[in-house]
Amino acid sequence: MSEEMKVHELILQNKDDRETVALALYRAGYTVRERRRKDGNRTIVYLEYWK
């Protein structure tokens, strides 16, 4: 990825918060996707976004 397309991660525990922030980022011109990863026995849900 080029320096301009650096992917950022944002961890938000609450689903409603993730949806609100994702919508705001999308409206601001960012590409946004929700991702999941395992951390031991926990699953961490986070947003990835880039311009």
Image: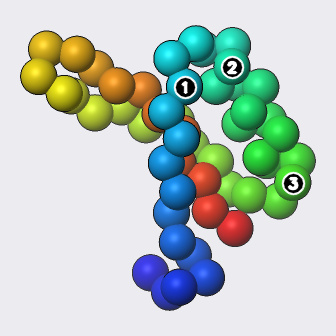
Identify the residue shown where x is 88% and y is 47%. Answer: 27
Residue hosting label 1: 12
Asked whether 10 or 33 is in front, the reply is: 10
Quarter the N terminus occupies: bottom left
- Give the spatial CA distance, label 2 vs label 1: 7 Å
- Give the spatial CA distance, label 2 vs label 3: 17 Å
Q: Which one is in front in this view, the residue at disc 1 or the one at disc 3?
A: 1
* Residue 25, position as x, y percentages in the image: 77, 46
* Residue 17, position as x, y percentages in the image: 69, 19
Q: Secondary structure at mark 2?
A: helix
Question: Dot 2, how many residues are within 10 Å of its Cα: few (below 14), some (14-19), or many (20+)?
Answer: few
The numbered mark at residue 17 is 2
**Looking at the image, residue 31 lies above or below residue 24:** below
Work out whether mark 2 precedes mark 3 in sequence or the reverse, and give the earlier one.
Answer: 2
Quarter the C terminus occupies: bottom right
Tags 1 and 3 touching, CB below 8 Å: no
Quarter of the view holding residue 43? top left
Residue hosting label 3: 28
Q: Secondary structure at mark 3?
A: loop
The numbered mark at residue 2 is none
* Residue 3, position as x, y percentages in the image: 53, 85
Tags 2 and 1 touching, CB below 8 Å: yes
- Mark 3 is on which residue type? Ala
Identify the residue shown where x is 64% and y is 48%. Answer: 32
Quarter of the view holding residue 18? top right
Identify the residue shown where x is 53% and y is 41%. Answer: 10
Q: Secondary structure at mark 1?
A: loop
- Mark 1 is on which residue type? Leu
* Scheme of colours in the image: rainbow
* Residue 7, position as x, y percentages in the image: 51, 63
Query: Total marks drawn?
Result: 3
